[in-house]
Image (tube, coloured by chain):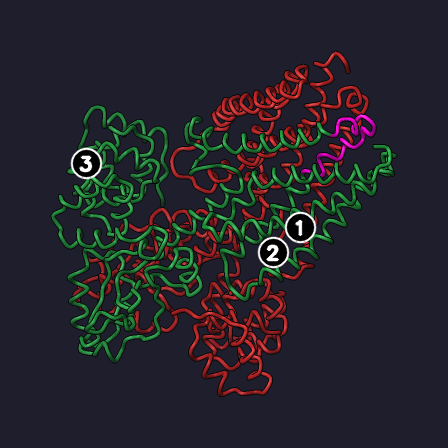
Chain colours: A green, B red
Amino acid sequence: MTFELTKEYLDQIQTAIDTGDDTMLRAEMEELYPADISGILYELDTESARYLLNLVDRGVGAEIIANLDDSIRDEFVASFTSADLAPFVEEMDSDDAVDLLNEQSVQVREEVIGLMEDREQARFIIDLLHYDEDVAGGLMQKELIKVNVNTNVNQCIEEIRQQAEDVEKVYAVYVVDDAGILLGFVSLKKIVLARKYAKIADIYEQDIVSVETYRPVDEVAEIMQKYDLDAVPVVNVQGRLLGRITIDDVVDVITEQAEDDLQAISGLSGEVEEDDTLWVRAKAQLPWLVAGAVGSLMAATVINGFQSELGKVAALAAFIPIIGSTGGNVGIQTASLIVQSLSDSSGLTYSLGQRLLRTFVLALLNGAVVGLMAGCYTLLIGEPRLFPVVALSLLSVVLLASFMGTITPLLLDRIGINPAVASGPFITTANDLIGIGVYFSIANVLLAEL
Amino acid sequence: MTFELTKEYLDQIQTAIDTGDDTMLRAEMEELYPADISGILYELDTESARYLLNLVDRGVGAEIIANLDDSIRDEFVASFTSADLAPFVEEMDSDDAVDLLNEQSVQVREEVIGLMEDREQARFIIDLLHYDEDVAGGLMQKELIKVNVNTNVNQCIEEIRQQAEDVEKVYAVYVVDDAGILLGFVSLKKIVLARKYAKIADIYEQDIVSVETYRPVDEVAEIMQKYDLDAVPVVNVQGRLLGRITIDDVVDVITEQAEDDLQAISGLSGEVEEDDTLWVRAKAQLPWLVAGAVGSLMAATVINGFQSELGKVAALAAFIPIIGSTGGNVGIQTASLIVQSLSDSSGLTYSLGQRLLRTFVLALLNGAVVGLMAGCYTLLIGEPRLFPVVALSLLSVVLLASFMGTITPLLLDRIGINPAVASGPFITTANDLIGIGVYFSIANVLLAEL
């Protein structure tokens, strides 16, 4: 039922482009959904992609450009003049148009807006450009259907008819008063079923969830998920209806956030994908590998400082891995739970003090288990004098790592950095380093031989 | 605009429950959305929660039960008899009803279905119980509006009126032939705007994306996202319309998947949350910590085997952390990219051979950079004889970890395990262990002193 892009099909398309077989290309593209055409564009060089894009319907072309992956779109759109771009921007939903223009230089942005023939769309865009992209205002679109509370169903249907082309998905008609203040909504289903001359005032639903322009997008996503909304109206502080956010944009926000978290934890910078060029991948991986290496070499310096001790009790070296990895593992576990709880605020959350107390108790338990395991291992290898050193070190390491795993994401979140970074290799390495320091210090104090 | 649950409010509610102040409770619950009432139930004990639930409208109660978190719902519903449960199940959307019944014992399931008065709903549920919950059939609901292609708009509106109560969100009316084969759809917007006696055959849209009952849910999520669908019809292999999947269910799938990935990478088993009891958290964290510790103690055994070597060249111990952490970091990075590419199959993907070749080239580069860094450090601490040992070991470790990071998630995915596990502590520890083995083996060969 859905389209599957094959190497053979792609070759056919490329040949048609090279030989200028526009009839075949137009016929083929006619059959496909915009999202499938995007899939083809990804695999073509910029010139071929532009050739193909110019053959499809302008509206479809606009939808395709709106939905391209950011990194590919940058490169692709760079080959457009402002005059090339304006007709596409004109056809986009206002929220997509703004996203695209925000990626361009101020000059291109101004030129494109100036070149647009649809002045209403231009005004929409200028309005939306004011908002940061991480708040509701930056995610909303101006296209929506609203009716005055004093109209009737018939007038409402007329309004829908007039806006039908601009508003692809209606979901609901918003009801406002004379001042444009949002009062409620009427679902499309209700309009279908209502008598033609029924007054909107009599049939509209007053219970409506709306969000203010300044609400962070992750809060918007949470609200839409919590209340199972397909679209949420956006209002200013006075309650005036300014736009709406639809569920597809929120799905994108959720997916992107999940990818960001995954990348932050995995120690990848930037939005890299497996099929990116090796150079892009190296640029994403190396900074964190180098940072990790620097941390580990600092640990090396610590260990090196204890060379004479190691010379006397060589078995001390055997516990370096467990000290390092336990700290890292506990840190990641703790931080991930905090990250998860930050992004999902249902129910009551604990105060910082309560969190730290809970962390402490749990760390005592975890540390005791791992410490005793490693302690028993010292007996197994016939180094009982290392029992207290290893067990006490692991307990301390688990306590420290749990504490850092709790504090760091909360701190990062407070200063506006993705808290998932706290589960990444940087923190793991920091835990590693601290762990080694603690271990050798404890060894130094407890072992009479050293 | 949205409800914020406070300790004070909760205390008021608890007091009203204790004193049996039903008037106050009914009035308060009337004001709230079901999702907000759920938030309150989470904080009450089972008895109080049931008391409150029995005061709200049956339909609202059904929606609340349908949307409770799994872990809490299990415990909550366990206090219900089949006769208590049946009226709620009757009011639920069929997909939610099936999710709930699937969590019950066969006996409760049969009893509840037997007790239901609405036999159509009972038939819906029996139909849906056949499907696994991880395929489209297990996610779909039977509630939808369909019309025969030979009807007109007026008849279609009549159909909507009859189903209005059962189908909360309509989105589109599906068009079928006499045999029930899905032919296309008419959007609600189009119905609002169409003439009353327009034939469905003349106005319906034939381009429709549908999914078969056996499609995995993550594929369904991907398709709905790709084509920006609010609902997707589900058909059997003959193309007969059986149900539909709505976007809110898919949002839940996406969110859950992201959480699963995060937990798998972080080494947490089960669906644990920060505000769970410490005992639940310990059960989630300890198995991985213990597994990690076992791995590290195996590394300890390896290191211990090289005690005499360490005794001669104590500086060897200093590089244990960098060997371990670099392997872990590279493994996580590589595996995460594969996990991401597995869950997002836009564009062409590489064959296994191409993937391994790309991995190899990139690993050479990464390994060379980190190896040279550590090599320079050996000069800094006056141990130039360790330069080749450390540099060569790191290069090997990066190569091995990259290789494992590529293969393991692909393999896990093939056998149906969440591939994100491959970025977790288990694999990290395995890389750690292998790294140590390689390091000491290379040292053994290259250092004449040993």
Mark toward the viewer: 3 or 1? 1
Q: Secondary structure at mark 3?
A: helix
**Quarter holding residue A181:** bottom left
**Quarter holding residue A422:** top right
Q: Is residue A31 left or right of residue B129?
A: left
| Location of residue B436 with respect to A407 vertically, above or below | above
Q: Are marks 1 and 2 in contact (CB under 8 Å)?
A: yes
Magenta residues span: A306-324
Secondary structure character of the magenta stretch overall: helix
A352 drawn magenta: no
| Location of residue A328 with respect to A293 vertically, above or below | below
| Location of residue B164 with respect to B311 vertically, above or below | below
Q: Secondary structure at mark 2?
A: loop
Which subunit holds the residue at mark 3?
Answer: A
Circle 1 is placed at which residue position?
A: B285
Q: Amino acid at mark 1?
A: Gln
Instruction: Using the image as rendered, state which of residue B400 and residue A380 is in the foreground.
Output: A380
The residue at 33%/51% (across/down) is A132
Q: Amino acid at mark 2?
A: Val
Residue B238 x %, y % = 39, 51
**Quarter holding residue A194:** bottom left
The residue at 78%/31% (across/down) is B301
Measure the alpha-carbon separation of dots 2 and 3: 52 Å
- How many neighbours does mark 1 have within 10 angstroms: few (below 14), some (14-19), or many (20 or more)? many
Circle 2 is placed at which residue position?
A: B272
- How many neighbours does mark 2 have within 10 angstroms: few (below 14), some (14-19), or many (20 or more)? many
Q: Quadrant of the N terminus of chain A?
A: top left
Instruction: Using the image as rendered, state which of residue A326 and residue B301 is in the foreground.
Output: A326
Indicate which disc residue A55 carries.
3
